[in-house]
């Protein structure tokens, strides 16, 4: 389909985030051809083939050819090469015998013979495949699965594999261990790996009497105290939306339904109802962006007896935990969906799935275990 040079250019441009249409234009082919090629490989560049150090090299094959021309026996040629006599004998016999042996042809034939399908670790290990498939069906990420295997089976090397192996098994079409449409269990839902591209943010309206995130105490910034939250809206098909809350220290997620819309009064009422059931020690502060849905932040602070801080303009990274949680929730809350169709139970189930996963940032503990342990302590009478 493509020459080696074209394949290399395609993968370089794809990694740089170019669209299939732009890549096709540079290669002077159709966008459909590029997309078809990418789909076969799942957007993952195939590993470059390498020769094993155990195999005969082209130089050794040339020495074999010279030895045959000089009338040396196979055993004598093997002694010169420092190889077993059986290796040289098989090499000569499978490549035309002493009469027809040619070094270049033999080397080319060996390279082609090495191009054979091999079973992956998942395909050849039923128990490992069942473990990985079970966690994938719970929407765990490949990284979470790989770390969970390492933690649960510390002495079982045969029950470990890398997250990249899982990704490749999902993406590469020739690997069918997880069945069709395995990509639906990934956060993105994609069946083709895309390059990471920075997204531009946009400005928001100005609210009155805001307290800047720069005035937030160090105890909040350093995540040493539980009870400090980050929040934002996740939009569906207009005018549907939900509010998301993430506790900074434990990364515990709460999804707040907004059945009455996402204007300031409706958002204030919904968040107040959601957080009011927590002990005061677990609702100390809330950090939000500068969206107009927080126009009633002063009343919210009074109702819940917490401090409300606002991020700098176009600084989504200042609410990093919340932004990450929103990306995870997009697996369940699609941009084009009417989010009003989800019940409170549905939204709680989505949050429970995320809270029940082991997290790298928590040393592979779960947010649910950490937050609920603090919740029980906060409710014990002093």
Image (cartoon, grey):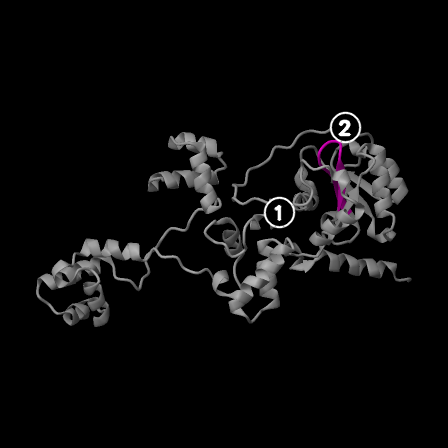
Q: CA distance from mark 2 to mark 1?
A: 33 Å
Mark closest to the chain's N terminus, 2 or 1: 1
Q: Residue 206 shows which numbered tag?
A: 2
Return the residue at label 1: 187
> From the viewer's perspective, is 75 left or right of 138?
left
In front: 149, or 246? 149
- Helix, strand or loop under label 1: loop
In the displayed structure, 297 sits above or below 41; it is above
In front: 166, or 287? 166
Residue farthest to the front, as pictured: 180
Q: Position of residue 289 (x, y in %)?
A: 73, 36
Q: Position of residue 147 (x, y in %)?
A: 59, 60
Is residue 27 visible in the rendered image? The answer is yes
Magenta stretch bounds: 229-245
For the point 52% across and 68% down, the residue is 157
Q: Position of residue 307 (x, y in %)?
A: 83, 42
For the point 42% across and 36% down, the residue is 33
In the displayed structure, 13 sits above or below 116; it is above
> From the viewer's perspective, is 40 left or right of 216?
left
- Residue 157 magenta: no
Looking at the rendered image, the disc whose residue lies closer to the viewer, 2 or 1, is: 1
Q: Residue 70 shows which numbered tag?
A: none
Residue 7: quarter of image: top left
Is residue 213 visible in the rendered image? The answer is no
Q: Position of residue 325 (x, y in %)?
A: 69, 46
Residue 243: quarter of image: top right
Residue farthest to the top, as pictured: 205
Badge count: 2
For the point 54% across and 50% down, the residue is 180
């Amino acid at each position: 389909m493509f020459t080696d040079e074209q394949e290399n250019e395609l993968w370089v441009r794809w990694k740089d985030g170019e669209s299939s249409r732009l890549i096709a234009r540079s290669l002077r082919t159709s966008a459909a051809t590029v997309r078809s090629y990418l789909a076969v490989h799942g957007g993952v560049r195939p590993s470059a083939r390498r020769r094993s150090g155990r195999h005969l090299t082209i130089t050794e094959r040339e020495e074999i050819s010279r030895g045959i021309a000089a009338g040396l026996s196979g055993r004598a040629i093997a002694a010169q090469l420092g190889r077993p006599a059986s290796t040289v004998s098989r090499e000569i016999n499978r490549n035309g015998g002493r009469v027809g042996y040619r070094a270049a042809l033999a080397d080319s034939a060996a390279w082609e013979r090495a191009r054979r399908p091999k079973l992956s670790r998942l395909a050849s290990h039923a128990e490992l495949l069942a473990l990985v498939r079970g966690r994938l069906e719970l929407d765990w990420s490949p990284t979470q699965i790989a770390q969970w295997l390492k933690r649960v089976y510390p002495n079982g090397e045969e029950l470990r594999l890398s997250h990249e192996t899982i990704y490749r098994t999902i993406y590469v079409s020739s690997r069918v261990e997880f069945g069709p449409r395995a990509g639906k269990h990934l956060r993105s839902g994609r069946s083709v790996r895309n390059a990471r591209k920075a997204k531009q943010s946009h400005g928001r309206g100005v609210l009155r009497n805001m307290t800047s995130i720069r005035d937030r105490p160090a105890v909040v910034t350093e995540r040493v105290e539980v009870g400090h939250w980050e929040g934002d809206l996740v939009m569906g098909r207009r005018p549907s939306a939900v509010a998301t809350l993430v506790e900074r220290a434990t990364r515990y997620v709460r999804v707040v339904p907004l059945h009455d819309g996402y204007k300031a009064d409706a958002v204030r009422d919904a968040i107040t109802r959601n957080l009011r059931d927590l002990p005061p020690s677990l609702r100390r502060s809330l950090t939000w962006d500068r969206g107009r849905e927080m126009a009633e932040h002063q009343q919210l602070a009074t109702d819940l007896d917490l401090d409300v801080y606002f991020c700098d303009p176009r600084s989504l990274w200042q609410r990093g935990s919340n932004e990450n949680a929103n990306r995870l929730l997009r697996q369940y809350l699609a941009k084009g969906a009417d989010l009003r169709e989800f019940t409170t139970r549905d939204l709680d189930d989505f949050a429970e799935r995320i809270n029940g996963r082991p997290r790298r940032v928590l040393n592979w503990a779960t947010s649910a275990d950490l937050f609920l342990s603090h919740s029980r302590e906060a409710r014990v009478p002093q």
